Image: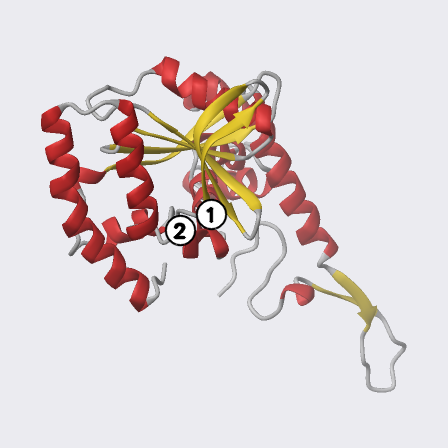
């Protein structure tokens, strides 16, 4: 991802400034209140938020309070639950942060102790599910590493405004085991496997149902094919296949004196290089 030059310079300078501060605070084992102060300063100087106008302390949620909330142009972006810098982040802390987000109806929540910065995506299913999307150890960030700066940029104000965290999450989902598992069982992929198997064993009759049975029984783990995440992956692949089919248009073909016929133009709506589902394009 492309990080604006001014943002990259700010990140480099702030990492160099705050790593000694965070390490010193951890060595002193400061409490939660002091950790919140450090986190608020980092939100401003590292991540680019206006800590007076865009960062709210003790955000009220159904009779309780989350440590911090971030708003951009008055719209709530994420909640932040802060723990003391010397405290290891545990499942109970994750549940607390996720419950805040679920009760407030926001998609993202950040859990941090100043050292570890964890960003969870909330899936409003029954029951509520969370996915750890970003996990940063701030003390190990290398300001000369482009990859490390890109991770920090995901949490920056400029990143939120460009939806880079959503894009990053979408990319992770596309490479998730659930998505890949569902894709392996889609008709276009099964057709490709069948073709390659017939090339290896031309005298053996193989159909896609047999291939599907082998994949589900012996190749793909059961946990990858079951549950809400697997169902969601299948739905996304089904929608993509339906979209590809709709892109196949039918129009009269131009002929020279002969009766006009009908010809199919695969993927015309998708522009150059598009093809029918399962078709390899150059």
> Residue 268, relative to residue 278: is it above or below?
below
| Residue 209 position in % (x across, y down) | 60, 27
Q: Is residue 205 left or right of residue 114?
A: right
The residue nearer to you, when weighing 208 against 245, is 245
Q: Is residue 152 left or right of residue 129?
A: left
Q: Give neighbour class at mark 1: few <14, some 14-19, many 20+ (Cα, 10 Å).
A: some
Mark 2 lies on residue? 49
Foreground of the two, 50 or 120 = 50
Extreme residue toward the bottom, this view: 257
The residue at 26%/59% (across/down) is 10
- The total number of labels drawn is 2
Q: Position of residue 182 (x, y in %)?
A: 53, 32
127 with respect to 201 (left or right): right
Which residue is the extreme one toward the front?
A: 52
Whether residue 221 appears in this view of the structure is no
Q: Quadrant of the N terminus?
A: bottom left
The part of the image, by quadrant, that contains residue 234 is top right
Residue in view at x 56 percent, y 24 percent: 61
The x and y percentages for residue 270 are: 64, 64
Q: Earlier in the sequence, mark 2 or mark 1?
A: 2
Position above or below: 136 against 92: below
Residue 152 image offset from top left, x and y in percent: 31, 48
Task: Give the residue drawn at x 58%, y 16%.
Answer: 127
Judging from the image, what secondary structure is the residue with disc 2 in? loop
Q: Secondary structure at mark 1?
A: loop
- Is the C-beta separation of discs 2 and 1 under 8 Å? yes
Q: Residue at x 32, y 61 (%)?
A: 7
Q: Real-space Cα distance between discs 2 and 1?
A: 6 Å
Residue on which disc 1 sits: 54
- Say which mark, if any, is on residue 167: none
């Amino acid at each position: 991802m492309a990080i604006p030059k001014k943002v990259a310079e700010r990140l480099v300078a702030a990492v160099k400034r705050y790593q000694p501060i965070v390490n010193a605070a951890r060595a002193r084992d400061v409490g939660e209140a002091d950790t919140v102060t450090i986190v608020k300063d980092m939100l401003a100087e590292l991540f680019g938020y206006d800590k007076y106008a865009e960062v709210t302390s003790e955000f009220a949620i159904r009779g309780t309070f989350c440590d911090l909330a971030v708003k951009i142009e008055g719209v709530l972006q994420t909640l932040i639950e802060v723990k003391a810098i010397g405290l290891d982040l545990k499942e109970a802390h994750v549940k607390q942060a996720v419950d805040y987000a679920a009760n407030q109806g926001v998609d993202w929540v950040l859990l941090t102790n100043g050292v570890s910065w964890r960003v969870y995506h909330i899936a409003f299913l029954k029951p509520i599910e969370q996915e750890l999307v970003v996990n940063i150890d701030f003390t190990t960030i290398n300001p000369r590493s482009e990859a490390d700066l890109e991770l920090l940029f995901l949490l920056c104000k400029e990143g939120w405004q460009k939806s880079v965290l959503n894009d990053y999450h979408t990319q992770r989902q596309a490479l998730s085991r659930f998505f890949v598992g569902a894709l392996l069982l889609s008709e276009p992929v099964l057709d490709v496997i069948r073709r390659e198997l017939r090339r290896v064993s031309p005298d053996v009759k193989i159909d896609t149902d047999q291939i599907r049975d082998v994949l589900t029984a012996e190749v793909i783990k059961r946990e990858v094919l079951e549950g809400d995440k697997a169902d969601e992956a299948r739905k996304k692949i089904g929608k993509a296949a339906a979209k590809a089919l709709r892109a196949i248009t039918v129009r009269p073909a131009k002929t020279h004196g002969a009766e006009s016929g009908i010809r199919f133009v695969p993927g015309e709506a998708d522009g150059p290089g598009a093809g029918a589902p399962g078709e390899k394009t150059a």
